[in-house]
Amino acid sequence: MNYKNIIFDLGNVLVKLDEQACMKAFEQLGLKDTAHIKENPEVMRLFRAFGLGHVTNQEFFDGFRSIAHSEASDKQITDAANKMLLYIPDEKKQRLLDLRKAGHRVYLLSNTNDIHWRYCADVLFPMQGHGVDDYFDGIFLSQEMHLEKPDDRIFQVMIEKTGIKPDESLFIDDLEKNCLAGERNGLHTFYNKDFNDWLSFLIFNHYL
């Protein structure tokens, strides 16, 4: 099928993630005895509220210091959080440009927070004079929408705002539950189990 619209997730689809590096950095700032933030309900509540845009950056910094009993600076917390984000391969950035050049409409739909998004936009996406707006026809972020995948509403809002037809659209995500949510809302989906899987999929289907 010739999809007119291709919707990308961010983490482990475009951006390579290292959650353990992030946790080690947080541990150095005082967050002890937590192999992963998912094991700490208080931290999880803070991160989820941050990702949904329900707390400001300053409230996040203050909340982290309170939970971790830490005197870390805002910059130290920011740098630790961004240890999770490793790189976006130039090949993937070029592929996004190629898709748009070929006439596809390309969108981003991500559960992310302001710290991570700023780092991606300012550091990881720039390439040879191209910035983040060159890669996408529209950007939809949980922090701005106050919604998150796999909630059906985030898909419905995106579909409404873009005017795309779901049956002409492909959604690529690294979490099966998010792909299932996309399917519930009429999108075709590709479950990106390994980091580069979607590249092979699109090349095989003659999109790239």
Image (tube, rainbow, N blue to C red):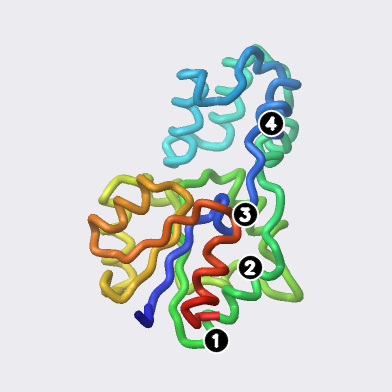
Residue that carries the numbered disc 2 in the rendered image: 92
Q: Residue 77 bears which disc, if any?
A: 4
Between label 1 and label 4, give the one nearer the viewer.
1
Give the image location of residue 150, x and y in percent. Answer: 34, 46
Amino acid on which the number 1 mark rests in the picture: Lys
State if disc 3 and disc 4 touch (CB < 8 Å). Answer: no
> Which of the two residues, 38 or 31, is positioned nearer the viewer here?
38
Q: Residue at x 52, y 64 (%)?
A: 198
CA separation in Å, label 4 and label 2: 29 Å
> Which of the two residues, 3 or 96, is positioned nearer the viewer here?
3
SS of the residue under disc 1: helix
> Which of the two residues, 184 or 144, is positioned nearer the viewer here?
184
- Count the numbered circles shown: 4
Rendered image quadrant of residue 172 = bottom left
Rendered image quadrant of residue 28 = top right
Between label 4 and label 2, give the one nearer the viewer.
2
Residue that carries the numbered disc 1 in the rendered image: 101
Graded by Cα atoms within 10 Å as few (under 14), some (14 to 19) or many (20 or more), the crowding at tag 4 reads many
Q: Earlier in the sequence, mark 1 or mark 4?
A: 4
Q: Residue at x 24, y 63 (%)?
A: 186
Give the image location of residue 27, x and y in percent. Answer: 70, 21
CA separation in Å, label 2 and label 3: 9 Å
